Amino acid sequence: MSGCGCKTKDNKDVNIICRCEDITLEEIRAYIYDKGITDLEQLRRLLRVGMGPCQGRTCTPLIVREIAAATKEPVSDVPLTTFRPPTTPVKLGVLAGGDDND
Amino acid sequence: MIKTADAVVIGGGIIGCSTAYNLAKMGLKKVVLIEEKYIASGATGRCGAGMRMQWGTEPNAVLARDSVAMYETLEEELEYDDSIELKQEGYLLLAYNEKMVEQFHKNLGLQHKLGIPSRWVTPEEIKELVPHINLQGLHGATFCPKDGHCNPFKATDAYAQAAKRLGVEILTYTRVTKLLKEGDKISGVETTKGTILSPLVISCAGAYTRELGRMVGVELPIYPERHQILVTEPVEKLQGPMVMSFYHGIYCQQVPHGGFIMGLGDPNEVKDYNIKSSWQFMHEMAAKITFILPILKNLRVVRQWSGLYDLTPDKTQILGAIPEVPGFFVAAGFSGRGFMIAPVVGKLMAEVMLGQEPEYPIDMYGVKRFESGQLYVEPSVV
Ligand SMILES: Cc1cc2nc3c(=O)[nH]c(=O)nc-3n(C[C@H](O)[C@H](O)[C@H](O)COP(=O)(O)OP(=O)(O)OC[C@H]3O[C@@H](n4cnc5c(N)ncnc54)[C@H](O)[C@@H]3O)c2cc1C
C-alpha cells in the first residue's frame, strides 16, 4: 500500500483509502481485525467507504485486498457489492427537467 | 449437523437484532439469530430511518413515543463504542388541503392525549423552521420537535454487538429453508447450514415472514411492496426537520453526515418482491422535491436504491404468537415504520415469548384481528 504522505496529529503516517469520505487504512483494519467484520457490504455501510461521489472507484479494490489478506482468501473470492445508479452524480434540477443553473 | 437452542430468531434486521438482544438480556441462554445475508441487509439497511411520534392511531403513536425515548439512551444501554448518529430536529408534516388540516388536527388531539409534544404550525412558522420551503398551496403543518432520525446500520450493529456479548449466536449467510413441527408445535428450523431444534421460533423476516408462515400452513396477510429512495452528495447543514408531504407521497431529510435522503410512495406499485431501481422514480422524486424545496435543485444525486415495505391490510404490524402453531411467533408487517418502533417491539416480543406479561397489552396487534375485523387503520403512511 503506498502512503499518501498524510500525518495524524502525533505525526504518524496514515493512508487515506477512501478520499470521498476520508477513511484511513488504519480505520478499515480496526473494523476488519478488532470487530471481525470482513464483509465488504457491511464495511461500506458502517464506515461509508465507497459511498461518496466516486462510488468506490478508488477505494473498493484496496479494501478488497485488505479483506482478502485478513481472510486468507484469494481476492477473486471476495464478493463485490451491488452497483447502484446513477453512474455519475446528477443534479436534482436536471432530473426534474428544469434548468441547470448553479 | 443438529444443534439445539432455547430460541431461534429468523432475520438480522433491526427487529430480529432487538428481539435477540432482549431475549438474552432476560436470561435466555442459547439464542441463535439466523440471517440469510448480512446484518441489516434487508429493509433496515435500505430505509429512511426516520422516527416520528406523529401517528394517527394510538397503538402506533405509543410504540413510537416510547421507542424514540429508548433511542435517546440506546448507546448507553447497549454500551456501544460508536455513535448511532441520532438527530432530533423534528418532523414537519405538510397539509395541502382542508381534509388534511382536519385529519391532522384529529391526530394532534390523540397525540396530546398521549403526551406527544406535537403542534400545529402556520405557514409563517413553517418558514422559520425550514426557510427554503416553497409555501405555495400550503395550509399549514404539524411539527414535533422530538421526531428525528438515526443511522440504521449503526443502530442495528449496536443491538447485534450487545446481543453477541450476552451470548447470542449470530449466523449470517444462512437461510431458513423449513420450519419444523412436532404435532402442532414448532420444534425448530432447517437451514442451509444444518438443523436447529428449538421450542421457540420467531420470524422477524420482514415481508418474507409471509413465506415462513406458509411453511407451517399459516397464511399471514403481509404484502411486499417496493419503495424507492435516493441520497444526494453531502453538503453543509441546510435543513433541520424532516419534511413530509402525504399529498405528494414524499419525505426528505438531511442526515447528520450531510446528504439529503428522500423517498416516494407510489400508489401503483405492484405487490411483489421486486427491488430493482427505476429511472421513473428519480424523475418523479426530483420533480416533486424541487417544487417543495427548490434550493435542492443544485444537489447531485449520488445513489438510489430500493427496499421492501411489509404491508398489512390496516397498515399496522402483526405482533405475537401464532395460535395454530404453539411456539411460533411473528413480528412483521411494519408497513414502513419498523425501524422507529424496534426498541419497544424487541422488548415486547421477548416478554411474550418467555410467557411474561408484556409491558403493553399486545392482543390488538395479533393476527386474529383480521378475522374479527378489529382493525387499526393508520391514516398517516407514505
Ligand atoms: C425505502 C424504505 C424507507 C423506509 N423508511 C422508514 C423510516 O423512515 N422509518 C421507519 O421506521 N421505517 C422505515 N422503513 C421500514 C423499515 O425499514 C422496516 O419496517 C424495518 O427495517 C423492519 O425491520 P425488520 O428487521 O423487520 O426487517 P428487515 O430489515 O427486512 O430484516 C429481515 C431480514 O430477514 C432476512 N430473511 C428473510 N427471509 C429469511 C430466511 N428464510 N432465512 C434467514 N433470513 C431471512 C432478510 O435477509 C432480512 O435481512 C422503510 C422501508 C423502506 C423499504
Image (cartoon, coloured by chain):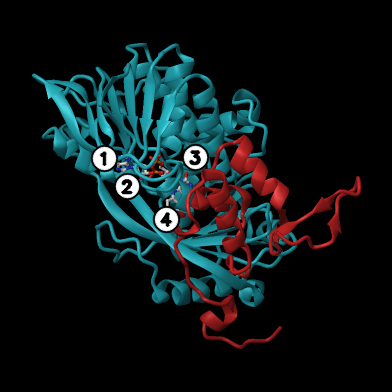
Mark 1 and mark 2 in contact (Cβ < 8 Å)?
A: yes
Return the disc, 2 or 3, that comes first in the chain's sequence. 2
Q: Nearer the viewer, residue A27 or B261?
A: A27
Residue labelled 3 has its Cβ within 8 Å of some atom of ligand 1: yes
Spatial distance from mark 2 to mark 3, Cα to Cα?
Answer: 15 Å
Return the disc, 1 or 3, that comes first in the chain's sequence. 1
Of badges 2 and 1, nearer the viewer stands 1
Q: In the figure, residue B332 lies in which quadrant? A: top left
Mark 3: which secondary structure?
loop
Spatial distance from mark 4 to mark 3, Cα to Cα?
Answer: 15 Å
State the mark number for residue B382: 4
The chain identifier of the residue carrying mark 1 reads B
Which residue in the protein does label 1 denote? B209
Residue labelled 2 has its Cβ within 8 Å of some atom of ligand 1: yes
Residue A48 higher or lower than B283, as above or below: above
Q: In the figure, residue B165 lies in which quadrant? A: top right
Which residue in the protein does label 2 denote? B310
Q: Colour of chain B?
A: cyan
Spatial distance from mark 2 to mark 1, Cα to Cα?
Answer: 9 Å
Q: From where the camera sits, is residue B51 visible?
A: no
Which residue in the protein does label 3 denote? B340
Labels 2 and 3 in the same subunit? yes
Return the disc, 1 or 4, that comes first in the chain's sequence. 1
Q: In the figure, residue A100 lies in which quadrant? A: bottom right
Return the disc, 4 or 3, that comes first in the chain's sequence. 3
Spatial distance from mark 1 to mark 4, Cα to Cα?
Answer: 22 Å
Of badges 4 and 2, nearer the viewer stands 2
State the mark number for residue B372: none
Mark 3 and mark 2 in contact (Cβ < 8 Å)?
A: no
